[in-house]
Image (tube, helix red, strand yellow):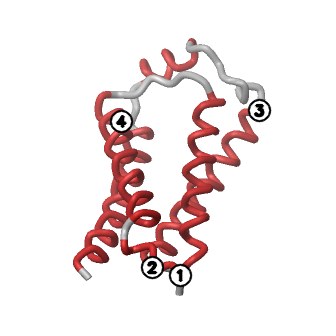
Amino acid sequence: MELEKIFKNLILIDFAFLILIVFSSMLQSNDLTEINNYLEKGLLSNYENFTRTISIILFFMYLITLNLLYRFISYGRNLYTFLIISGLLLNYFNGSVVYTSIGSVLDQIGGIITGSILILIYYSPIKENFKK
């Protein structure tokens, strides 16, 4: 039971960090935005509307998936993995980005939390809760 509590707390912390990342990206300085405009563009740079739409869809699906994981719904595990891989691919094909120091730290901690959740849902006794 203690592992379930840790798992659920990790999901709540992941949600909190996601919100913090969104706020930190909205409060980014104009200088940083200008620098990002001069960086090398990725493969999806010609499809900005498509990329934004996909990003928004992935964001809301991620929120829903965190809820599914919190309630141990079986297909939430596969959906979470799919969203993580999709997000990584989208970031890769978007090209270079410069973060603020706070944004970088939040992103790295978010990655650690995501990795922890993935390990727990696939390689710990928590995985049995998703087979119901």
Mark 2 residue element: helix
Q: Which of the two discs, 4 and 3, labels the residue nearer the N terminus?
A: 3
The image shows residue 94 at horizontal and vertical percentages of 63, 29
Mark 4 residue element: helix
Quadrant of image for the N terminus: bottom left
- The residue lying at 27 percent from left, 76 percent from top is 5
Asked whether disc 1 touches disc 2, contact meaning CB atoms under 8 Å apart, the reply is yes
Q: Which residue is mark 4?
A: 103
Q: Which of the two discs, 3 and 1, labels the residue nearer the N terminus?
A: 3
Left or right: 1 with respect to 90? Answer: left
Asked whether disc 1 touches disc 4, contact meaning CB atoms under 8 Å apart, the reply is no
Camera-side mark, 1 or 4? 1
Left or right: 103 with respect to 77? Answer: left
Left or right: 83 with respect to 129? Answer: right
Q: Which residue is mark 1?
A: 131
Q: Which residue is mark 3?
A: 47
Q: CA distance from mark 3 to mark 1?
A: 39 Å
Q: Which residue is mark 2?
A: 128
Q: CA distance from mark 1 to mark 4?
A: 36 Å
Q: CA distance from mark 1 to mark 2?
A: 5 Å
